[in-house]
Image (cartoon, coloured by chain):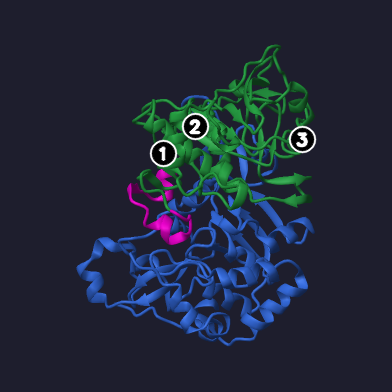
Chain colours: A blue, B green
Amino acid sequence: MRNKVISATEAVKAIKSGSTLTIGGNTIRRHPLGLVREIIRQEIKDLTIYVWVAGIDVDLLVGAGCVRRVEAAYVGMGPLGFAPNVRRAVQEGRIEYEDFSETSMLARLRAAGMGLPYLPTKVLLGTGMAQYATHAKPVTCPFTGEQLYAVSAAKADVAILHGYYGDVHGNIQWPMVRNTDDIDPVIAKSADHVIFSVEQLIDPKTVMSNPTMTYIPHNWVNAVVEMPYGAHPGTCDGIYDPDSRHLEEYMEAAKSDDTFKAYLDKYVFGTKDDFEYLEQAAGLAHLLSLRVSH
Amino acid sequence: MTEYTLNELMAVNVARQLHDDEMGFIGVGTGGRAFTVAVGLPIVAARLAQLTHAPNFTIQIGTIISPDLENIPKVFTENHITTWPTMARVRADDNLDMFVKGKVDVGFVSGPQIDQYGNINITVIGDYKKPKVRLVGCLALPEHLAFARRAFVITDHNARTFVENVHFVTGVGWQANGKSREEYNLPGGGPVYVFTDLGVFDFNGEGHRMQALTLHPGVTPDMVQEKTGFPVIIPPNVPTSILPTEEEIELIRTKIDPENILLKY
């Protein structure tokens, strides 16, 4: 069985400027932020992003000027409120944005994962989404005659996700205690090329004896990167809480382009990899203080 | 006479409209006052209904199905939410399928812009293509208004929120862009009540426009009109809102929210 473990630097090379990207996680939970920081370091630009309920992942990429267009049900900072870089970029007309609801964006990602060009939905009826969307068209049900909307498949070139545990072959496992509010398996199925960062690499024998804990099997995954605290400063539910100290600093820095550029210079361009980032942004003692028990 | 806070009055008025055997869907929310109206008030109302007239009322908070309301977390931070005892934590995609299918009885919603037909905007302020203020997107607000059997709107009353026309129809009320809910063939019941700091409203006014059902004690029709950006229908002799009983206030303060977390702001 092939060993799929590579470095973040190598893994991110699969993402080309001008391509489409989808990202796992939810608001400030379990986003592959170590991989996101590496995308920024490699100065990959002009990305079109397909996400469901996103947050700091998209805000970082937009703030670093990597993004041309976002299609999403939500981009915000969860308990911290609005995503400052995204808000500014949309208001200043620097990025394109297309809105979908949770079930219609889910339908678009599902269609991609099912190999279909579109799925039908009722949720757009009468809404501003229907009025403005370029990826939605009215259709009539051939069986009932009902008016529906077809929403097109959001098929990305690459998906990046952060998993709790994984083995070298790319079997990704979840823990018993977790926050289930995400659609990571749907995201993983939707893209052509799937990169997972994981909190911890585990023994393939452990996987073999607990196969029902595998939520993403190796045959869906192209590359695995071990990135402890790879969701920092967000949370990896069941393992560590969000780093509210760093998130406050982030929100403050993201208030203007200049201060956010200084943030990126210090923490992303000023660090050669995510190990250095974690030392700079938090330090081991602080990282350990974020650990949770249950 | 029982003394109560405005939040307690609002919670009691919400609770009295919840029925036995229903399931309510509450979002995850942000902080401060937005947390109170979107999360805190609905949880208190749900628990109050359980402890009084609707023992089998249950809630889901996102993907958390029927959490233990005797053990509400002291803080709503990640690990407290993740370890809150509950009957099930389902995958978000499964959860949304059941929502669309019609398995949510009461959807609790809020928003920065609401118009006289109950259309709600949480997406942009200003022009969609170049907005004055970019908000969070759509989330599941469209689903609440399209698929829940009844949607309950909880928000504070001011003319910036209650506007003549929403700038973007995130969720459809009783009429949008000149077409009615029925014409759109939306399966859910749509917005049925609006609970504000001034009173309780429904959409049974002429042409399904918002009208006052009850006003809170001390609130006059002029006060309501002043804080509403469209002509609000206020019937003559509009009754006073339901006043909390001593038992309800006792339950909220000693059993449901003893540390004043849910109704703090």
Q: Report the residue that reaches farthest toward the front.
A: B1
B37 vs B14: above or below: below
Task: Describe the element under mark 1 as helix, strand or loop.
Answer: strand
Instruction: Give the residue at mark 3.
Output: B159
Q: Report the residue that reaches farthest toward the left.
A: A209
| Residue B93 colored in magenta in the image | yes
User: Which mark sits nearer the N-terminus, 2 or 3?
Assistant: 2
Do pointers 3 and 1 mark residues of a single chain? yes
Position in image of residue A115 (x %, y %): 46, 52
Position in image of residue B231 (x %, y %): 78, 23
**Measured Cα–Cα span from mark 3 to mark 1:** 31 Å
Q: Report the residue that reaches farthest toward the top.
A: B236
Task: Describe the element under mark 2 as helix, strand or loop.
Answer: loop
Residue range highlighted in magenta: B74-98
* Residue drawn at (68%, 54%) of the image: A97
Task: For label 1, count other residues whose C-alpha is less than 10 Å away and answer few (under 14), some (14-19) or many (20+).
Answer: many
B145 vs A248: above or below: above
Q: Tell me the number on the disc at residue A108.
A: none
Residue type, mark 3 in image: Ala
Instruction: Give the residue at mark 1.
Output: B59
Q: Is residue A12 left or right of residue B57?
A: right
Q: Is residue A117 visible?
A: no
Residue type, mark 1 in image: Ile
| Residue A190 colored in magenta in the image | no
Q: Nearer the viewer, residue A270 or B259?
A: B259
**Measured Cα–Cα span from mark 2 to mark 1:** 13 Å
Task: For label 2, count other residues whose C-alpha is less than 10 Å away and answer few (under 14), some (14-19) or many (20+).
Answer: many
Task: For label 3, count other residues whose C-alpha is less than 10 Å away and answer few (under 14), some (14-19) or many (20+).
Answer: some
Q: Tell me the number on the disc at residue B148.
A: 2
Q: Chain of mark 1?
A: B
Task: Describe the element under mark 3 as helix, strand or loop.
Answer: loop
